[in-house]
Amino acid sequence: MSERPTIAFEPFSEDHQAFRRSVRAFCEGELFPHAKAWDDAGAFPLELFKRFGELGYFGIRHEPADGGSGLDFWYVVAYAEELARSGNSGLNMAMLVQGEAATPVIGELGTEEQRREFLSPALLGEKVAALAVSEPDAGSDVAAIRTSARRVGGDYVVNGSKTWITNGARAHFLTLLVRTGEPGPKGLSLLLFPTDARGYEVSRVLEKVGNPSSDTALLFFEECRVPARCLLGEENEGFRYLMANFQGERLVAAVEAVATMQLVLEDALRYAGERTVFGSPLARMQVWRHRLADHLTSLEAARWLTYRACDLFARGVPALREISMAKLHACELAQRVAYDCMQLFGGMGYVLETPVARAWRDLRMTTIAGGTSEIMREIVAREAGL
């Protein structure tokens, strides 16, 4: 695929592009050669968290005082786009949760003590972080969660369970949503929960359809005591904090989906030019020429819808509608693109040694995690006044 031409709105400066090249070299040189092996093993090496921390990838948009780089959101976009070149979606998901889901809210709300104890070690990769929200009976309906935290003296006592928690089995701490008050969204709070608390248990690591190298855990809490100083922000304001935090997470998911689409299409275009069927390359067959042309067009539309949302988010402009549209469109489209590209590869597209097969498998998660497509549609409809 040819390079995009320069246009009036170019979000990436030469500094952004230099950073992009360094991330690409890291992903292609240190990660991609091991991508299939880590999937087969069901885990990637724990020390990769420290490696990402050393490279500054977790702290891109965090304050230097906390160990971050204090850079703008377009560096995060470049990082997420190039991270797709690792060839291992489970690794990507784990690292993006660490840097873009579990920790931004700590940078926004954390006290100096909380940032020193939890945020700074996470940005360095010395502590693994997880965002613990979903429960067996409360996934998309966040306001229905039941895991409780009651105040007892100088502690909160936590009881309940969480599931589908990325990094859950390895986490040193959780950014944990709990119920501290009345039913509904107004009774929720965020706690920074150390996983060495007595009564805490990783019940099991869930076996998933895709992303096998990422641990996704079922967690239990039984009379777990954590100090009241672990309350993040104000009590009973957790739902509001979480909804704001979701915006960056969902936007990065859209960026990653677009980047994966591009790589899958690059592979398909290359294969279509090399593979000969009935005496002609696949690229000369109209059915594939036109299908690929449609997908290339859709890819550009998804990219610029996502960049529009990124631009608003980077400038601090409310963008709930645009971010929800970007996640909905990019993640739904990525699955269709991967499906067709897998079909183009024929039998080779169905073996896991081929990147397109792993991409097709792993992309299925994108319309579920971080807010389902159905929830994105509901948000868009509500924002349109329906």
Image (tube, grey):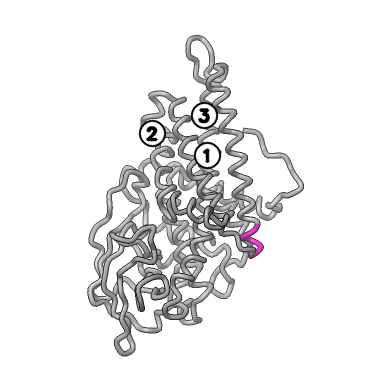
Magenta stretch holds residue 313: yes
Secondary structure at badge 2 equals loop
- Report whether residue 69 is seen: yes
Which residue bears the numbered disc 1?
261
The kind of residue tagged 1 is Met
Q: Earlier in the sequence, mark 1 or mark 3?
A: 1
Magenta stretch holds residue 119: no
**Residue numbers of the magenta segment:** 312-316
Q: Residue at x 47, y 57 (%)?
A: 96
Q: Earlier in the sequence, mark 3 or mark 2?
A: 3
Distance between mark 1 and mark 3 Cα atoms: 10 Å
Counting other residues with Cα less than 10 Å from the Cα at mark 1, is it few (<14), some (14-19), or many (20 or more)? many
Looking at the image, the residue that sits furthest to the right is 8
Which tag is nearer the camera, tag 3 or tag 2?
3
x, y percentage for residue 346? 41, 23
The kind of residue tagged 2 is Glu
Q: Is residue 29 left or right of residue 44?
A: right
Of the 4 image quadrants, the one containing the N terminus is top right
- Residue toward you, 170 or 304: 304
Query: In the rendered image of this protein, does residue 311 appear above or below residue 143?
Result: above
Q: Residue at x 40, y 83 (%)?
A: 229
The kind of residue tagged 3 is Ala
Tell me the tag on residue 353. 2
Which residue bears the numbered disc 3?
268
Q: Earlier in the sequence, mark 2 or mark 1?
A: 1
The reply to whether the C-beta atoms of the residues labelled 2 and 1 are less than 8 Å apart is no
Secondary structure at badge 1 equals helix
x, y percentage for residue 186? 42, 74
- Report whether residue 191 is seen: no
x, y percentage for residue 91? 42, 51
x, y percentage for residue 291? 54, 26
